[in-house]
Image (tube, rainbow, N blue to C red):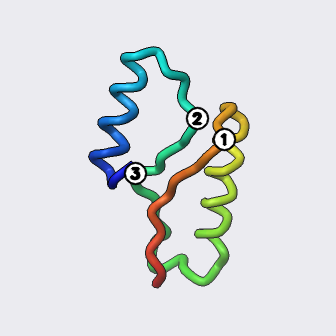
Amino acid sequence: PAGYDGALERSVAQYGSGVAPDTLVVMAAAVDPALRARGLAGALLTALREKAIAAGLSRVVVPVRPT
């Protein structure tokens, strides 16, 4: 999808057309700056991936910004 708007528009359109979801699109996720450098971002990404797999989704799209 082309950004947040594209992801939202596509999901609504496909839901309305009866298309089964196959992708988890994460709109926002963050680690508090006070808790950085503890591996939490990696753990968060792993947890999101595990949730997607458990829901039967084959893809995860996450905006990631290096710090």
Distance CA(mark 2)–CA(mark 1): 6 Å
Does the residue at mark 2 contact the one at mark 1 (Cβ under 8 Å)?
yes
**Which of the two labelled residues, at mark 2 and mark 1, occupies the earlier sequence position?**
2
Rendered view: 56 above or below 24: above
Identify the secondary structure beneath mark 3: loop
How packed mark 2 is, by other alpha carbons closer than 10 Å (few <14, some 14-19, many 20 or more), is: some
Distance CA(mark 1)–CA(mark 3): 17 Å
How packed mark 3 is, by other alpha carbons closer than 10 Å (few <14, some 14-19, many 20 or more), is: few
Rendered view: 66 above or below 17: below
**Which of the two labelled residues, at mark 3 and mark 2, occupies the earlier sequence position?**
2
Does the residue at mark 3 contact the one at mark 2 (Cβ under 8 Å)?
no
Q: Which amino acid does label 1 sit on?
A: Ser
Q: What residue type is labelled 2?
A: Asp
Which residue sits at x=46%, y=84%? 67
**Pointer 2: what residue?**
22
Q: Where is residue 26 in the image (x, y as percent from the top left)?
A: 47, 50
Identify the secondary structure beneath mark 1: loop
**Pointer 3: what residue?**
27
Name the disc covering residue 44, or none.
none
Which residue sits at x=45%, y=63%? 63
Identify the secondary structure beneath mark 2: loop
Q: Where is residue 9 in the image (x, y as percent from the top left)?
A: 30, 36
Which residue sits at x=64%, y=36%? 57
**Pointer 1: what residue?**
58
- Relative to 21, is 50 on the left or the right? right
Q: Which amino acid does label 3 sit on?
A: Met
**Which of the two labelled residues, at mark 1 and mark 3, occupies the earlier sequence position?**
3
How packed mark 1 is, by other alpha carbons closer than 10 Å (few <14, some 14-19, many 20 or more), is: few
Which residue sits at x=46%, y=59%? 29
Q: Which of marks 3 and 2 is in front?
A: 2
Rendered view: 9 above or below 45: above
